Amino acid sequence: MQKSLAILTSTFENAIVLTGDSILVKPLDDDFFTSEPFTTYGLINWQDFTKRYTSPLFYQVADHKVDTVRVRDGPFELPESRQVSSRKADQLFPLHDRKGTIPDNTSDGGLMVINKVKHWKTLLLATYYNLNGNACFYQLLTQSANSAEKETFAAAATVLDIPFYNVKTNVEANGFWYNNEYRGVGMLQFDPVVDNYAVQEFTDKYKDESPEFLTDANFKNFISESSEKKSAMFFRVNYPRLLPIELIDDKFIVKENGDRIRMFSDAKYFSTDLENSIWRVMNDYICHFELKCSYLKRHFKDERKSKVDREKFCGEGMKQHLLWLTGGR
């Protein structure tokens, strides 16, 4: 509910929704809002990891027709030459590959870009869904008791038949290995401008001579061939969040046996300096600038002891981990 109200009451025509756990791993240039696909669609939606599980009843409640035509292969939009219709669509086609449905996958709740002029109806309907979310729409959109605000924008645009851009490059996990177990800590989301170019190049290459090649699986292989066809833009570190006191005190990054870990594994999208830089920034604000905020007040409650406790944390926890990350630099 908070996101839809925040966007509605914002004075900006274009709005980027970013949760506090999102880190830019490449510059967000000024021409982002004047580039495709945003100029055409006015709403960009990123995928989450899981397949969509919106109930068929949602479309009945919304009085929105689900056609018998298959227009997608997963998140990948099929050209007209590959779209097929069948009276047995309920048995033959995945529900969310069909015309009139919200595309796969589920939506990432931490990212969205929207033009409020093009999508003012979308915003109003999404707000309505959220106002009645717990009573009705959250259950229909996710078939669970969890909040489903993240699904309401794509749902509203779909019901209103207002086109939006669903990023086709799949979200990727990033994390670390420890004791032969992998622990994901964050999600890499990709640049929609590069994604749009890749979709166009892939479609143009095969639509005439080999249209049967235009599938989601083949698109994934196509963009993996070159680093120019996919470019990470956001890194959402949300499992766990970058809360330095908890990460150290709860033995997440410093184990009982003294082992230390890097949370981020090597990636072609950023270097290990990213993690070093993040910890340097946290160290500066907590230990040097002595920032006053609700997070630190929650941990250093007693004013008489807070300075001593902060200095102890900085000297024994933060400093030691930062020195280890940077190799003593």
Image (cartoon, rainbow, N blue to C red):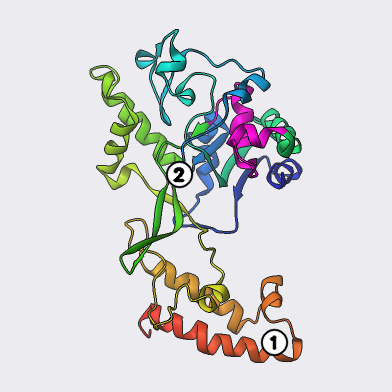
Q: Amino acid at mark 2?
A: Phe
Q: Is residue 230 above or below residue 90?
A: below
Q: Is residue 169 magenta?
A: no
Q: Residue at x 54, y 37 (%)?
A: 44
Q: Is residue 119 above or below residue 317?
A: above
Q: Quadrant of residue 243?
A: bottom right
Mark 2, mark 1: which one is toward the viewer?
A: 2
Q: Quadrant of residue 97?
A: top left
Question: Can residue 327 be seen in the rendering of this structure?
Answer: yes
Q: Specify whether 114 is left or right of 326.
A: right
Nearer to us in this view, 202 or 265: 265
For the N terminus, the image quarter is top right
Q: Specify whether 123 is left or right of 179.
A: right
Q: Residue at x 48, y 23 (%)?
A: 95
Callout 2 environment at 10 Å: few (<14), some (14 to 19), or many (20+)? Answer: some
For the C terminus, the image quarter is bottom left
Q: Are marks 2 and 1 in contact (CB under 8 Å)?
A: no
Question: Can residue 292 be seen in the rendering of this structure?
Answer: no
Dot 2 or dot 1, earlier in sequence: 2
Name the residue beneath numbered marker 1: 306
Nearer to us in this view, 44 or 151: 151
Q: Amino acid at mark 1?
A: Ser
Start-end of magenta stretch: 136-164
Name the residue beneath numbered marker 2: 49
Element type at mark 2:
loop
Q: Position of residue 277 (x, y in %)?
A: 46, 71
Distance Cα–Cα, label 2 vs label 1 = 41 Å
Q: Is residue 56 above or below residue 4?
A: above
